[in-house]
């Protein structure tokens, strides 16, 4: 079950997706996080972010909409508090990084690259729930390449670009990310969606729109992994509605070297471990 992804050695190919597992502290009280292939942290930004106003999570048929807005306590708090906790565990740590400008990304990547406990960096260029940065970089090939190239200049850590499905041609973005120096690609992030309360006649999310995740987007994600696998040679990490070992294997058959479990964590804290066990049995 062990794999090596862009130089990161993992016990298995099952990771937890950014934003669905916090920094691991809460889940560590419920499951043995050392059994995971890797932990991908919640997005870390240069300065603390309060995130978007509530309501910011809405359940939908076969999934959920979220508009969290990258709430986190910033780089310093991550280095002082969250990273020391993760360093106590025997599991690779991949830090998801977000920002509003190229310089913000670079500053965070530069700081993380000095930390031996950080095994890899995932560039969030695909979050749809913020007004500046993130997805604006991930929907334009030139901006994608520019950002990845800037991060590459200041880091020797494995660099993973997380791609948005909210584009016309995801292979163009994938090629741009690889051209900029990405060692691997994560796909997909959430799909833009909306829900309206027919009684109040108002959107159910305070920010009107949000990112759709869960089983509803799995066919889109599998298709995009398959497309990108034909276009680039770097390892791919499949994300989107993975609830079972069979779902994970479907992504692997489409061309993924590893997978990330996201929305399933909200339903069952043991979901990733069950998928690891089931995948091993299935194989």
Image (tube, helix red, strand yellow):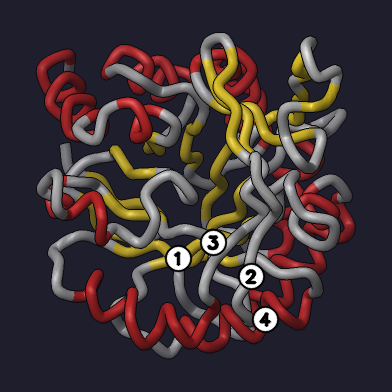
Q: Circle 1 sits on which residue?
A: 95
**Classed neighbour count for the residue bearing mark 4: other residues with Cα under 10 Å, few (<14), some (14–19), many (≥20):** many
Where does residue 277 sit, x and y in percent of width and height? 12, 26
Nearer-the-camera pick, 226 or 43: 43
Q: Is residue 180 visible?
A: yes
90 relative to 240 in the view: left or right: left
Cα distance in 3D space between marks 2 and 3: 10 Å
Report helix, strand or loop for mark 4: helix
Cα distance in 3D space between marks 1 and 3: 7 Å
- Marks 2 and 3 close (CB-CB < 8 Å): no
Residue 196, compared with residue 182, is above or below; it is: above
Q: Is residue 230 visible?
A: no
Q: Which of pointers 1 and 2 lies earlier in the amino acid sequence? A: 2
Q: Which of pointers 2 and 3 lies earlier in the amino acid sequence? A: 3
Foreground: disc 1 or disc 3: 3
Q: Which of pointers 4 and 2 lies earlier in the amino acid sequence? A: 2
Report helix, strand or loop for mark 2: loop
Where does residue 96 sit, x and y in percent of width and height? 51, 61
Nearer-the-camera pick, 15 or 264: 264
Q: Circle 2 sits on which residue?
A: 49
Q: Which of pointers 3 and 4 lies earlier in the amino acid sequence? A: 3
Image quarter in which the N terminus is found: top left
Q: Circle 3 sits on which residue?
A: 43
Cα distance in 3D space between marks 1 and 2: 16 Å
Q: Which of pointers 1 and 3 lies earlier in the amino acid sequence? A: 3
Where does residue 259 sit, x and y in percent of width and height? 39, 35
Q: Circle 4 sits on which residue?
A: 106
Cα distance in 3D space between marks 3 and 4: 14 Å
């Amino acid at each position: 079950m062990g794999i090596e992804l862009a130089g990161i050695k993992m016990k298995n190919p099952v990771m937890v997706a950014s934003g669905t597992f916090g920094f691991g502290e809460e889940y560590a009280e419920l499951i043995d996080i050392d059994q995971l292939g890797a932990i991908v942290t919640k997005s870390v930004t240069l300065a603390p972010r309060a995130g978007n106003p509530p309501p910011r999570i809405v359940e939908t048929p076969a999934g959920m909409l979220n508009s969290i807005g990258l709430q986190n306590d910033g780089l310093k708090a991550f280095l002082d508090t969250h990273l020391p906790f993760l360093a106590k565990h025997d599991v690779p740590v991949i830090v998801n990084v977000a920002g509003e400008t190229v310089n913000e990304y670079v500053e965070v990547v530069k700081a993380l690259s000095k930390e031996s406990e950080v095994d890899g960096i995932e560039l969030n260029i695909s979050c749809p729930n913020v007004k500046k940065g993130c997805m604006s970089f991930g929907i334009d090939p030139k901006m994608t390449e520019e950002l990845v190239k800037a991060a590459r200049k200041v880091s020797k850590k494995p660099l993973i670009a997380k791609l948005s499905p909210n584009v016309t041609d995801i292979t163009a973005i994938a090629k741009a990310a690889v051209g900029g120096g990405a060692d691997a690609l994560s796909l997909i992030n959430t799909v833009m969606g909306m829900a309206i309360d027919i009684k109040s006649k108002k959107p159910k999310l305070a920010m009107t729109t949000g990112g759709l995740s869960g089983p509803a987007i799995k066919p889109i994600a599998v298709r995009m992994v398959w497309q990108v696998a034909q276009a680039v040679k770097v390892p791919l990490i499949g994300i989107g509605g993975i609830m079972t070992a069979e779902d994970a294997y479907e992504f692997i058959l489409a061309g993924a070297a590893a997978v990330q479990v996201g929305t399933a964590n909200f339903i069952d804290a043991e979901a990733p471990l069950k998928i690891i066990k089931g995948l091993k049995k299935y194989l």
